[in-house]
Amino acid sequence: MRISIFGLGYVGAVCAGCLSARGHDVIGVDISANKIDLINNGKSPIVEPGLEELLQQGLRQGRLRGTTDVAAAVLESDVSFICVGTPSKKNGDLELNYIEGVCREIGMAMRDKNERHTVVVRSTVLPGTAKNVVLPILEDCSGKKAGVDFGLAVNPEFLRESTAIKDYDFPPMTVIGELDKASGDLLESIYSELDAPIIRKDIEVAEMIKYTCNVWHAAKVTFANEIGNIAKAVGVDGREVMDVVCQDHKLNLSKYYMKPGFAFGGSCLPKDVRALNYRANSLDVEAPLIGSLMRSNAAQVQKAFDIIASHESRKVALLGLSFKAGTDDLRESPQVELAEMLIGKGFDLSIYDRNVEYARVHGANKDYIESKIPHVSSLLNSDLDDVVAKADIIVLGNSDERFAKLAEQAPSGKRVIDLVGFMPHASNGVAEGICW
Ligand code: NAD
């Protein structure tokens, strides 16, 4: 493949070295003549282990050259990778000057090109940037139609400086956000030899994935730091603790607890979060991340309420009262909290939960259900069909498998609100999700 790379900083220079090493013909473009000179003389413009050797190899084999000539680079390549910087503005927003500038240049160059060209955004950009900023500039400047006359894709970079070449060769995944299938196919052919899953999504999804990964990394770092701070205050080495926690690939480092949806609850998580936070406070240890978890959780319950309240009807069925399916435990169930909010605001609420129903009659929780939350438990109805029939809004509150079909096929005239994610991604399910 003939590839032009715009911006030869930490991302662009590494891409140039790695792609040329894998047999592609690479033209590197930068506004800095100094960087171009360095590259053309076999010197890496950045400090990155192994990069200089790759650049020299590319030059030797005639597969790499640097230039400041944008038009030539576009004309002599099939695809352009945009790797320019996207720094922060003072207010925290992204500075898109470099993106806009490079798009204008590439767009103008595409005007004079007869063959189809593909533009790939590798820079980190907020969701919507490719479609709302990159695409119109390219179309305006080229006089061509995106997705038809030229291809457009987003392909976020996951490399980490200092191990960038290894990260290029062994990425966790390759994410391709494509406007048109041809662009996705082209990128897939470039990356097919890497031993990593190739994930093809809509452009905005790919943009969001990159932010999600980075913010998650930040949250993990902050979390580990807060644990370390508290551990130290109680005389424990937090590194020792985290070493053990990270050996658990079943629950701690897996997809579990990592699914956007409703608030967490039950008898452990809220209690333990509060306890640790209390201990941190009493030891004068700053733990703002952990300190904000319960607030974040409460906001998710409020969000569910707001979604329900945004509909006109006040006739609501809450399916699932315990914090998860398969248990009758109602302690700190956010579903109970939601029910109380609805009751407090005068909604006509009925509730179905077969486990709680069972417990009310047979279980050890009978007492709790009858004496602690009589205002809620009095609304329980053991007939699912009856509960659904009487309401206009059906809220899927936990993941009891009996509720799944309602997310795909709402009874006629009913609105279904899915708090737990029954609806498969990108399905035509009828339910309104809490955060999807
Ligand atoms: P950088 O500042 O090191 O490099 C950007 C380069 O773009 C500079 O050399 C600059 O001269 C050049 N440039 C600016 N305008 C240009 C134009 N019109 N034409 C050609 N070149 C132009 O930036 P970076 O660290 O490589 O990051 C690039 C993007 O990749 C950012 O969006 C960043 O968030 C993202 N990213 C960075 C890393 C990382 O570890 N650095 C990892 C993943 C993603």
Image (spheres, rainbow, N blue to C red):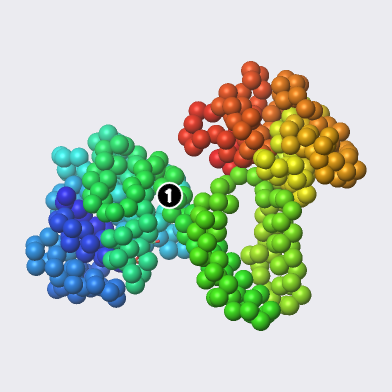
**Which residue is found at the position 75% from the left and 68% from the top?**
278
Q: Is residue 347 left or right of residue 210?
A: right
353 or 130, which lies in front?
353
177 or 275, which lies in front?
275
Q: Report ligand 1 position as a quadrant.
A: bottom left
- Quadrant housing the C terminus: top right
Q: From the top left corner, tell me how far across and down residue 180 is, in percent.
A: 31, 37
Q: From the top left corner, tell me how far across and down residue 316 is, in percent.
A: 75, 29
Q: Amino acid at mark 1?
A: Glu
Q: Secondary structure at mark 1?
A: helix
Q: Is residue 79 left or right of residue 93?
A: left
Q: Residues within 10 Å of mark 1 (few under 14, many from 20)?
A: many
Say how many tags the image has.
1
**Which residue is found at the position 77% from the left and 42% from the top?**
336
Q: From the top left corner, tell me how far across and down residue 382 is, in percent.
A: 77, 27
Tell which residue pokes out farthest to the right in this image.
371
| 247 w.r.t. 372: above or below | below
Q: From the top left corner, tell me how far across and down residue 129 is, in percent.
A: 42, 48
Residue that label 1 marks: 207
